[in-house]
Structure formats: C-alpha cells, structure tokens
Amino acid sequence: MTVLNERQQLSYIAAQAADARLNVELETEGMTLNIGPQHPATHGTLRIIARLDGEQVVWAEPVAGYMHRGYEKLTEVRTFPQVTSLINRIDWLGSFANEVPFILAAEQLMEIEAPPRAQYIRTILFELSRIANVSLFLGDLGVQMGAITPVFLAFRDREYVLNLIEGATGGRFHPNFDRIGGLKDDLPKGWIDETKQVMKKLRMFCDEIEDLLFGNEIFQSRTRGVGIIPADVAKSYGMSGANLRASGVDWDLRRDQDIAMSWDKADFKVWTHPDGDSWARCWIRLQETREATKIVDQLIDDIPAGPVMTKVPRIIKVPEGEAWVSTENPLGEMGYYVVSKGDLGPFRVKIRSASFNNISIAPWVLKGVYVPDIITILASLYFILGDIDR
Amino acid sequence: MIVQLAVEIPYWGQSLLRVLGGLVAVLLPAGTIVYVFLFKMMSFMQSRLGPMEAGPYGSMQLLAEVSKWLQKEDIIPENADAKIFKIAPVIVLASTFLLVVVVPFGPDAWMTNFQAGVFYALAIGSVSVIGILIAGYSSANKYSYLGGLRAAGQLIAYELPMVLAVVGVVIQAGSMNLQQIVVAQNTQEIFGLDWIGLPFVLTQPVGFLIFMIAVQAELTQAPFDMPIAESELVSGYMTEYSGFRFLIFFIGEFATAGVFAFIASILFLGGWGVPFSWFGWDTIDSVDNWMNVVGPLIMLSKMMLLVGIIMWVRFSYPRFREDQLQRFAGRF
Amino acid sequence: MPSKPKVPGLVKGLGVTMGIMFRTFKDGANTVQYPHVKETPPIRSRGVIALHEENCTACMLCSRSCPDWCIYIEAHKQLAPPRRAGGKPRQVNDLDRFDIDYALCMYCGICVEVCPFDALFWSPEYEYSEPRIADLLHDKTKLGEWMETVPEAPELEAGAQKK
C-alpha cells in the first residue's frame, strides 16, 4: 500500500472538486429556460418557466400576475358609470365586448331591458370589436412564426374598424359607450354605409391572410399536429371560445344563450374543428372573423328605428341582488358576477376572464414539445395579459 | 472616348487597388441591399413607405443608423468570455472579405484567380459558422447559446446541398476557376442560339433552385432563420452584442448576402459578362478593356436581382422549426 | 413534415407580397407621414375637454364622478345683480379655479356626460403634449381656449330619435 504524500492528496481532492463544480455549472439534468415577462412573443408580461432537456420541454409553468391591476378591488369603490369606463381596459383589444356583460348584469338587477335599437347597435359594436381583436391575432400569428408581413396587413385593416368605432363612440380602443338602459349616443350619419365598405375590405383581408399565411406549407407544418388538446381535457380546464371549438366541442354562447342582444336575429355558422391542434385554433379564428363580418352585414340593414336609451333615473341606484351574465367574447367566455347592495356602485364584482382559463392548460399541453413549439402553442391559444391578470 | 490604361502599376499599387476593390465590393452591395431591400422593398410589401425622413426618401437612413450604433456604449456581459466575445463578429465579417477576393468582376478586374476558385469559395463560406458558434457560446446567455447551436447545425447541414448544386456547374464548365466558368457561360450556345450564351440556369434550373435555397439557409434568412428567431430568442446569438459589434454582424449579414449573390450570378447567370457573340469576342483575351468598367455594373445588377429574390422570400414566409429545417436539408 | 415543397401554397404567398408591393407603388402606402400630413379624427373623437365657463355653476358633479379624480374646482359665492330691475340680488357661484389634470385623465367622458348645465364639451384636438408633466394641468383659461376647437355635433343616422 503506497502512501500518497500530502501534495498528491491535495491535488486529488482538488480534481474531484473541479469535477463537481463542472457538473453543477453545466446543469446536466436539464436547462431551466425563463421565457421571461419581457419577451417579444408573449402578448404582454407573461412568464413561463420551462425546464428543458436539450430542445424538449420536460416541465413548464406559467407565472401570471405581472400585470395585476386589482380590478375587482377597484370596482368596490366606484360607481357604475366609472366601473364601465374602467373595465374597457381588461381585454384592451376587444374593447366594447368587455362592457357588455357587466351592463347586462346591472340591467338584470334593475329588471329593465335596452330598447331594440340599442340591442342591435350593441351587437354590431360587439362583433366589430371581435373583428378588431381577432384580426390582430391573425397578424400576430405571423410574427410569432417568423412571417413579418401579415402583421402590417392586419394593422392596416384593423385601422378601418377602429375608425368606425371611433366615429360612433369617440374612442378607438376604449369606447365607454354602453350605459345601463342602452347606449350613450346614437350613430352618426354615414356610419352604416361606411361599415358596409369596411366589412368588404375585411373579407378581402381574410382572403389575403389565408393565401399568405394559412396556405403556406411552412406554416402548416409548424402548426398541424402541434399542441393537441382533446375535448374532455379542454372542458375540464374550463377553456372557452375558439380554443374549445377547435377541439370539436360545439359550444357558442351567442347561439345557446338567451340574453338581451340581437344574435338571434342574424344567421351565422358556428365553426368547429375535430383536430384540436394549433392549426385548428388558428383556422377557426379566421373563419370566425369572416362570420363576424357577415353578422354585421345582416344586422346593419335592419336596425329598428327608435330611442337608444330607456327611461332611467338620472342617478342610477341598482337595487339589491346578485346577477351573473357571460357572453362569447373574442377571447372566450367572459362573465361578470355583480353583487349590489342598492348603492351607486356595485358591492363586489367577480370577473371571469377567458384567458385565465385558457392559459391554465399550459403545463399540460407544453409537456414534451420543442422550444419553438412553445411559442406556436401559446400563440394559438391566444391570450391577452390584461385578461389573465385583470 | 475610350482610354487604354497602359500604365504599369507596381505590385504594391496593384495590391492596394485590390484591397480597396475588395472593401468596395463588400460594403457597397451591403449598403445598397440594406437600403433598397430592407428599408424600401420590405416597406412597400407591407403597404407602408419606410424611412423617409433622413435624406431624400430616406437614403441617408443607413448613415444615420451606422452613426447611431457607433456611438453606443460597448457592453460586454460580466460572465462572457471577453476575448472570444470580441473576436466573433470579426470572424464573420472577415469570412465575407475572404470570400469576395475570388469573385471576378471583369476580364481583368479580379483580385485573385485561383484555379480552384469554387473549392475555395465553398470552404470559406463555412468559416463564418465558427464565428457564430463562438458568439453564441461566449455570450453567457442561454438564449444565445441555443441560437448558436441551432445556427451551427443549420449552416453545416446546408453546406451539402450547396456543394452538390455547384458540382453540376463545375462539370458543365469543365473547370473550378470562376473566371473560366464565366467565359464558358458566355461563349457557348444553347439550341443553336448563341445570342443568349449559356447561363447555366437554363441547363441546370434544379441546381439553381437548390443553390438559392441553400444560400437562404446559409444566410440564416427566413424561412431558415431559427438562429435569429426574433420572437423566441430575441436575436439568438446576437443578443448580447451592442453598438459597434452589432454593426459588424449587421453589415456582415447583408454583405454575405451580396457576396453569395455574386457567386450565384457567376455560377448560374453568366457573371460579369454578356454573351460574347454580341461583340464578336472569341476568348477572354479578346474582350475589350471597357468591359472592366461595365463588368462590375453588370455584376451589381445581377446581384441585386438575386438578392431581391432572397429578400422577397424572407419577407413572405414564416420560419421552419429546427428539426424540420434539418429534415428539409436531408431531403436534398 | 414537408416532403418536396408543394409549389402552389408557397408561390401564392409570394404573389400576395408582390401584389401588395405593386399596389403600394401605384396607389401609395396606407400610412400617413405624420408631422407633414395630419389625419382628421372623427367628429366625436375624444381629444380634449373644453370648458364653457359661463355655464358652470361649480356644482362639483363632474369632479365627483371622475374615476381618477383629476378635476380640481374651487369656487366662492358672491352676489350678482338682480335679473330684473327691483329684484333681489342673486347668489351665484363664481369659479376661482377649474383645472383638469390631463396626466391623470382617462378620457372616459363621464364628466362631460353628467354636467347638467352643458359646460363641458369634447373636442377632437389631440396635439397638446408637453415636455413637462406639470404643464399638462390645464387651467380655466386654457380650457376656455379649447372651446374654439369644439365641432358641431354630427347629424344622426336615419331612424334615430331626436332628443
């Protein structure tokens, strides 16, 4: 048995320590990638922590809350008109669509209904905001995949819709137009003709995007078969909107619910797709945009004459009670649970936002996918951070 | 009025001219490409006008951008390996300069005339891979690391289709010397018509297509721009570079596009020449001297055409995923 | 995964971008070169709020209903001459200070709507950005100047009820 002298012992221990340090530094079990809050791909400040093995994701978790603005607390100390102007900003792309369920809930508590003209105009503005929202999605889809041109086309055509909304309400992104009992104002002259022109342009835009993006084989190979969500998993996570319909579930609140809006006066198709992959989700949104233009075209010719506001007192105090109203918003199902104690403002409002449930499926669906596919799947799920975090 | 330059220029003068020529040959196309295609063509394809403020119709925008980058702070990340961090962009740009020396611009306007020009060109094209790889590694940033690895895989994979496409040209021309290839294209005839010469794109369209796709991949342009996937890796291996170093990468990207287009136009479109039968020349020695001035202009226009196609594809397509990209290369 | 790329879809995409490029050459771009050319916003556009001081009675309704509390009003009571000869002097509110802080204003329009005396009006004027935030507090005089930019209310569509 040889005895190592002290110098040899020390060098042996040093070599072992160096080896251990190397293992820790290289993290040979897997790299943790932080698709951090500031990132060009996520629609806002969403953070996804992904543990990678090479290029495959082993485990992923979304961390939301970087944009929490405390809406439900804010509504406790504001009056109904003030709350209406605030909630425009939850899903800032589909702006008008945020106000509608809240106002409908308040009207349910007051047991009044808006006059038919107001209902028609509300529905038309709702569909316009859907078009504005989803056309941006179509453009953004290109950017996430690497095609830089569609987004400019999307913004170009979205400008027309925003100009329409501004012409009627005064605000492009935050219309603040819905009031308890009807609408703030009537439509300005020439709006109906302009809307018809814009709907034609938007259909042309949908065709352009279909040729440029959806017909592209590269895009198809990036999205087909990626991120498949079966119908029962989607339902159990509470997904809604186009994501649910892309998994084959025939669920559309516009058709299935009976609330004081005019969707039953228009004839539209509810698109579903059996696959449940990213391609299905993107494709369904394209078709829904086209359907929305058709709904607007049908409704805009039939707007009944009359007032846009029922008789409501000047200072509105909503009677005591609780009401829940949800609608088929551009992002999914958005609902408000309004608790009122007979005051000027609500006592408590619970906001059910679509994107929160849509993004909750991320850990399940991101297992085993490649890093670029994370972006594809998140892009196809389509969330707005303001909607997730409120 | 054509003046015969019969002056005997000493060797050091010739070398100086060659160096200047090389600089111009790399930087002028880079600037032109950036302005015409990146600023203007991309904007027009997106229904907007592009930069209009700096200079008439935004022509000075490149100057403004260059000055902006030059005056930025030189930031090197703390954990980065500073020595190779600094060398990486220089390697990428140096490979472009090394590549342009073998491109002939006219019957006598060349910098070097290797007998194995094609071989040299393909080999040097791979040197930039080293630069990208060490840029990604030394940035001490996981995103850059991923970008560098992806780039290395992609660039090496697409060398093979490029080589195979070029082999067809070499066989048809009978030589690896680029000057010979140009002469071969302009002196032969197709279908008995000698007024179009024989640009090899006519006899080897598939080779041309494969070469262009391989060039698109070598330049990491969309649809092959996974290494710089902007929406995921935020510029990939270039993320940590700022100021002057980023400028070198930027110029390198477009200069390389220009130089590869030069090479493509030599191999497939007939290079600096027009069919010799137009002017009644037989061999390269009988070509007039004014061709030395017109030749570069012809090269420039052919280069712009090819780069236009590269950029057109870049602005229209989404990008491939990395494994799909490699599979695509394998199918060639 | 793509095998040999099918030409039609990819080529159609190229055709779309080329088509847009030629359309831009022919018809011009869809963009407006802002400082040189300015677009006119629609009439109802919410640009800035203008104050018609004579109508204001300092009832404080706008200040109370603002979601951001960005309107600052100070007033005092004083006696005004009687309307008819031989009558009593009336007590009126006289405005000392009426400031709107446009750094806080969220352009919701609730103040314009609740004003019972029609003293506040929307104007589509939007170019009033300042280098200092403090300058964004528009006082009484400045708000009175905006009154010149207030447009006539637009005509309403057919079928609307006249108010």
Image (cartoon, rainbow, N blue to C red):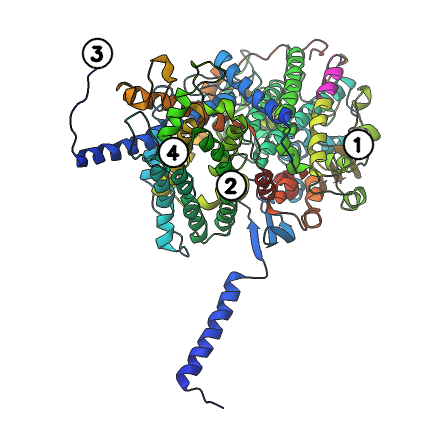
Quick check: C137 left or right of C69? left
Q: Where residue C98 sits in the image (x, y, percent)? A: 49, 28
In the rendered image, which residue does mark 1 sit on? A253
Residue A170, quarter of the rendered image: top right
Magenta range is A293-303
Q: Residues within 10 Å of mark 2 (few under 14, many from 20)?
A: some
**Which is more foreground, mark 3 or mark 1?**
3
Spatial CA span between label 1 and label 4:
56 Å
Residue A387, quarter of the rendered image: top right
In the rendered image, which residue does mark 2 sit on? B160
Identify the mark nearer the N-term, 4 or 3.
3
Q: Amino acid at mark 3?
A: Met
Q: Residues within 10 Å of mark 1 (few under 14, many from 20)?
A: some
Q: Quadrant of the C terminus of chain A?
A: top right
Residue B53 seen by the camera: no
Identify the mark nearer the N-term, 2 or 4.
2
Badge 2 and badge 4 both on one subunit:
yes
Question: In the image, is residue A148 above or below residue A347?
Answer: above
Question: In the image, is residue A82 above or below residue A263?
Answer: below
Q: Dot 2 falls on which chain?
A: B
Is A141 colored magenta in this rendering?
Answer: no
- Foreground residue among B89 and B157: B157
Q: Dot 4 falls on which chain?
A: B
Spatial CA span between label 3 and label 1:
82 Å
Q: Dot 3 falls on which chain?
A: B
In the rendered image, which residue does mark 4 sit on? B255
Q: Secondary structure at mark 3?
A: loop
